Structures are given as structure tokens and as C-alpha cells.
Image (cartoon, grey):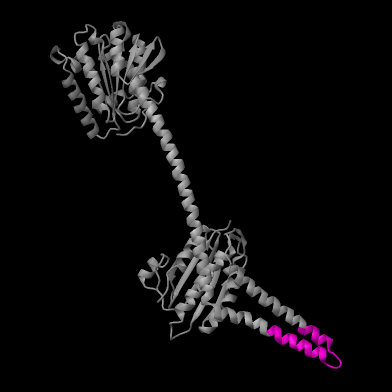
Amino acid sequence: MTTEMRKTGIDVVGDMVAWGAHFCLFYETREDLLDTLIEYCKSGLGREEYCLWIVAEPLTIEEATAALKAAVPDLDRHLADSRMEIGSARDWFLQGGTFDGKRVTDALYEKFARVSARGYAGMRATADTTWLAKKDFWRHFCDYEDGLNEVIGNQSLALLCTYPLATCGAHEILDVVRTHQFVLARRHGNWDIVETAALKRAKAEIKELNEELEQRVVERTNQLMLASEALREAQTQLAHVNRVTTMGELSASIAHEVMQPIAATVTNAKAALNWLNAQPPNLEEARQALGATVKEVNRSTDVIERIRALVKKAPPRKDALEINGAILEVIALTRGEVVKNGVSVQTQLAEGLPLIQGDRVQLQQVILNLITNAVQAMSAVSEGARELLISTAKDASGGVLVAVRDSGPGLNPESFARLFDAFYTTKPGGMGMGLSICRSIVEAHGGRIWASRTAGPGTTLQCTLPVG
């Protein structure tokens, strides 16, 4: 059963009414009755609900219809479409001149079943009790009212029973209060509300359950935040392991990149010493040799700093980043591996690209993985040129597009679908983590990464990175 609060049209009720509500109104004047029931039925019609209004003398069906039509101009359409029914209490409650609570309950339930089958949001009903003035059926009617609480408690049904105050004594009022969830009283336009003990207990239980639910939500949210933080930490550690592993695979090539400027430094330093030992010393030549020495030392320092940045473990950070410079640094680190595998590298780096906000080390890790994967894929190619094209451009959304295209053997359809899944690999002995980590990094930067076929042999891996 839905517990959605219904708009009854009775402002004083507020949020006390949900489906399954069984409440009553004590009224003093005819105007008090009509004003309340007109708003009650009008609200139901406006919410695509079926409305049933059982009127009792001295109010007639014609008078009730005319009063409701003044508030609902298209009432005739609702009546014609059988969305609204206005009936007589004597026909509804006193068939054959006798009240039979079971027959009335069965009739109500049967009508509700037909209404539900027609797709209405629910059914609201109201019935007046002036026909009980002689009290001939009072006790039976109270039993009927009490039984309704069991019948409608789990249905999309709301019942409003109306009692004239003029014909109700203290005993009758107590009986009515006992058999309803809450009681309204309207006297010359003024309202009073009486909540039964059962309703008060129910509201207290609901409040307690809501507080318990709120506490559970807070606790669960805290648990999810801790789990999310732990996941981010694990991803950071995994990315670091991946960087170190990749750098280990490139160790021979990196050593070559470091040794080249060191060897040049030694050569230039020896030349400077020779020029200084000459008779007479050639200071100009010595100065040039020492200048070249400083240049090579700086070059080797740059290589080592780039290696340190990729290997060291540091928390992610977001800085303004010029992507072309970051790519060129990675190309320099992989030069030895590229040469060793006979790969020709070309770049098409667009000028004037916007700066992106990102972690330089993480994004260089993505580029490093894409380049090493491409080189390894082409190492198995025995025929044809091994060509690697690295390009950048501005994408349609104003961000940056990075593409790495190789001339390797390409991928099969299954590999395209699963390439970035964790533990999926196309390489013998591969762990299948590199590209999965690349996807996590790119998505954490608000971008996306994907693979596509090229016009010729090979594969293109592309990623987009937004600005800011």
C-alpha cells in the first residue's frame, strides 16, 4: 500500500491523511457540511481519483449536485464518465429498510475493485449519517464503522464519515471517536481536531521510525564516504604500482637516456681540462666546453626529475597543465624503447590548446601506458613500417583530444568491447591493469577514453580531457 499523503482539500487536516485513512466530521450547519465535502470531492477529482458522495436527508442528491457543480464547472463530464457518483444514503445503507453492515462493506469493496480495475489513482468516499437519527441501527453501525478500519487499512482508499452534532449525544460522540482514526469538528466555520489515542501512538511510532531511519542514513552515508575514500586510496596506490612497474620495464631505455648526457658531460669536462692544460691555456675553448658540460648536466637532471616524478608516491593534485609539454616529456623518456623496437614516432601537436586542470603525473602515466602498449603491439609486426603517431587537438566541447595511433596488428571485436576492463589483456603474461587504470584516471579528470579502428592496420586510442 502506498502511504503517499493525499491532498484532501480540507486545509485544517494538513498532512494527517494518507491512503487507508478513516476519519469523521461533526458538523453544526448545512453550510459547514457542504463547504467541507465540496472541497473534499473537488480535490479528489483534480487528482484523478474516483469520488463517491452518499447524501442523506434533509440534503438531496439534486442539492448536492448543484452545490458541487458551482465549484466544479465540468462536473457533468465527470458524472458522465463515471468518475463521480452521488447517491442516496437510504439506497446505500438501507436496502429493504434494514441496515446490514456486511452487505454495505461488501458493496464498498466491490466498487473499489471496479474503480481500481479502471486505473484510478484511488478512491475517496464520504457518507452522511442523518438517517441514524432514531438510533435503531446505532450499535450495528458502530460495529460496521469499526470493521472498516480493517478493510481499508491496506488499500488506496480514504473514507470521511459525517455526523450532525445536533443528533449526537455524549455516548454517540465517544463511539464515533473510538471507531475513527481522528475526528474533525466544524461549527459555524470554525475547526477543531481530535486525534485518537491509536493515531497518536501511530504518529509517535512513525516519528520514532523516521528518526531511526535518519540515523541509519547518516551512518550508512558515513560508511560509504569511508569506503569511497578507501577506494580512492587503493586506486592511487594501484596507479603508483603501475607506474613503477612500467618504469621498470623501460629501465634499460631510461638508463640509456640518463647515460647519454652523463657521457657527454664527461667528454666536455675532459675537453675543458685539455684546453686549460695547453700552453698557453685556451680559455675561450675551455669556456665553451664547460658551458656544454653545464648544458648536459641540466639535461640529465631533467631526465632524472621526470623519472622521480613518475616513480614517487604523492597524493593527486590539480594544476593548470599544458598537455603538449607533458606529452613531449613522456616521449623523451620512451625514446630508447622506441628506438630499440624500430618504431618511428611522429607528432602532430596542435598549437594554442587551452590549459587543462589535472594531475600532471597521472596524465603522463596515461600517455606512458598508451605509448608503451603501442610499441609492444608493433614489436610483433614483422612486415611493414612500425609507425606511431601522437596527436592533440581541440575537441568539439572545447576540451583537449589526445590520440595515439599505431600500425600494429589491431584488435578483434571482443577486445574493443573489453579493452579497458580490469584484468583483461591481449598480451601474454600481461596483468590487464594498465588500461583499466588509464580509464579510472581519465574519468576522474572528467574525460573519457576509448579505442577505435584505423583506416589501415593498427589501433587508435583516444581520450578527451575537459578544460577546468
Q: Residue 186's x, y, as percent?
A: 38, 12
Residue at screen point 35% across, 69% down:
414
View extreme (bottom): residue = 279
Q: Is residue 266 magenta?
A: yes
Residue at screen point 59% across, 82% down:
256
Screen quadrant of the C terminus = bottom right
Query: Which quarter of the figure has residue 106?
Result: top left
- Front position in the image: 463 or 144: 144
Q: Is residue 282 magenta?
A: yes
Is the stretch drawn in magenta largely helix, strand or loop? helix
Q: Which residues are magenta?
A: 264-289
Query: Which quarter of the figure has residue 315?
Result: bottom right
Compared to residue 113, the image places residue 332 above or below, namely below
View extreme (right): residue = 280
Q: Residue 182's x, y, as percent?
A: 34, 19
Compared to residue 442, the image places residue 179 above or below, namely above
Residue at screen point 50% across, 80% down:
387
- Front position in the image: 258 or 386: 258
